[in-house]
Image (cartoon, grey):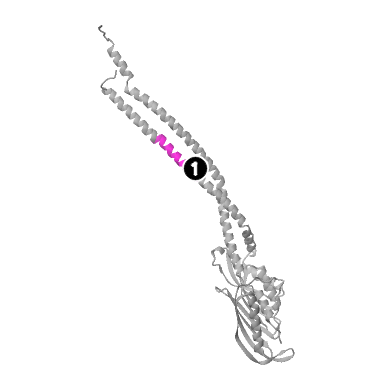
Amino acid sequence: MMPKKLNKDQIQKIILSTLGFVGLIYCYFNFFLGPLNKSRETMTAAIADVDAKTASSKTELKKTANLELQAKEATSRYEALKHTTADGAPIAWFPPKMRTFFADRGIDKVTARLESSGDFKQPELSDWIKDTWAIELPESDYSDLGKAIADLENSEPLLAIHRVAIHAEPEQPQYQQVSLSAQTALLKQ
Amino acid sequence: MALQLNLLHEEFTQERQRKRDPLKLGIIALIAFGAILFLYYGWNAYQTIQIKSRLNASEAEWQKVEPKVTAAQKRATELRQIIDSTKVLDGLIDQRFYWAPFLAKVAQCVAPNIQLTTLEGSLIENDNSVAVSIEGLAAAREPRAAAEEFRQLLAEQLEKSYADVKVAFKNLEDLDTMVNLGGLPTPSARFIVTVTLNRQEAGPTKAAEPAKPIAHTK
């Protein structure tokens, strides 16, 4: 049979039990389940992030592999163009190179001097330098000159002749005095 | 009706009160609820451990892929730079004006009664054109006609390979002195021809295809 009224002691015990229950709930959610759920959410987000990074990286790897195939020709061409620049300062090797080049084609006493040097306007050519050379050929036969210029234009793709001046020598009509202004694109050392 | 006397009334009441003690019942309920919460926590912790192991696996995979990706990105940048640089360099190469074919064309136009003394040519920047000045002597009974013949032939030859060709006299004057042409004294004229043309051209001459020399007259 239930007592109709709770006595003071019983009320206190009920209040104590209720407080214990509330304390348990509070501690459980704040110190156990809450941090656990938070850490789980953080880890889930981290997994999504890492998975996304891995997936995009794999795509990136595929793209690079494709780019490597596409750039094969460009790479070999670029390497060939790079090899047109010899080691060392251009002023040290370009004049002798020109002297030898023209001497091999029957044109002696060739001199070359650097007129100007500067960067290209194009940002793609930041690794390249634009040099302008004055090449003097004091004694040249027109036929030899034509062949030599053709050879030069064919063998030096990064050399462009911007100015040609040919003067007949009054005392030696078989020879011409020739001045060339050539612009070269050389790899920066 | 028989009279029943409960002589243990107090003991029964105490026993009943002990059984229905709110604190005891509360502790039992609390323990039961705590056990349920513990089980639920255990289930959550198990799931979290599984997620942790998935995260570890994902991170391990990323650790494997990351160096490759970094290298690939670096290589891709390098390749793009190479492609762009090659494109611009090819543009420079393609835009070159080849002088050897031009000199060959000039040489083809020089007849035995024409002597060229000066040829000066230069590329006009930002205009894609070439300007050339040719100075020489023409010797004939009609030296001006010989010079005009040279001008016309030069224009005709250059038009075959270049666009927008203009060949014009800048100067043409008779000379008082006679020149020796084929053993005969012949009247002569000095001329200056200016040539302008567009750089558009078929391509460079082959090295084996020499330019013809300028003929000299005496």
Residue that carries the numbered disc 1 in the rendered image: A47
Residue B165 is covered by the magenta coloring: no
Residue placed farthest to the right in the image?
Answer: B183
Picture quadrant of residue B126: bottom right
User: Residue at horizontal 40%, vertical 28%?
Assistant: B34
Quadrant in which the C terminus of chain B is drawn = bottom right
Q: Position of residue A164 (x, y in %)?
A: 63, 77
Is residue A170 shown to the viewer in this render?
Answer: no
Quarter of the rendering containing residue A157: bottom right
Answer above or below: position of A3 versus B205: above
Q: Is residue B49 visible?
A: yes
Chain under disc 1: A
Q: Residue at x 32, y 28 (%)?
A: A18
Task: From the top left corner, tell me how far across and down residue A174 is, in percent.
Answer: 71, 82
Q: Nearer the viewer, residue A137 or B107?
A: B107
Query: Which span of residues is magenta-colored?
Result: A30-49
The residue sitting at 58% across, 54% down in the picture is B75
Query: Which amino acid, mark 1?
Result: Ile
From the viewer's perspective, is residue A34 above or below residue B18?
below
Q: Position of residue A83 (x, y in %)?
A: 65, 63
Quadrant (top left/top right/bottom left/bottom right) for the N terminus of chain B: top left
Q: Nearer the viewer, residue B50 or A164?
A: B50
Task: Please identify the quarter of the rendering in which residue A184 is found.
Answer: bottom right
* Helix, strand or loop at mark 1: helix
Magenta: predominant secondary structure element?
Answer: helix
Any magenta on residue A40? yes
Depicted B132 relative to depicted B70: above or below: below
Provide residue A91's location: percent of width, then percent of height.
62, 69
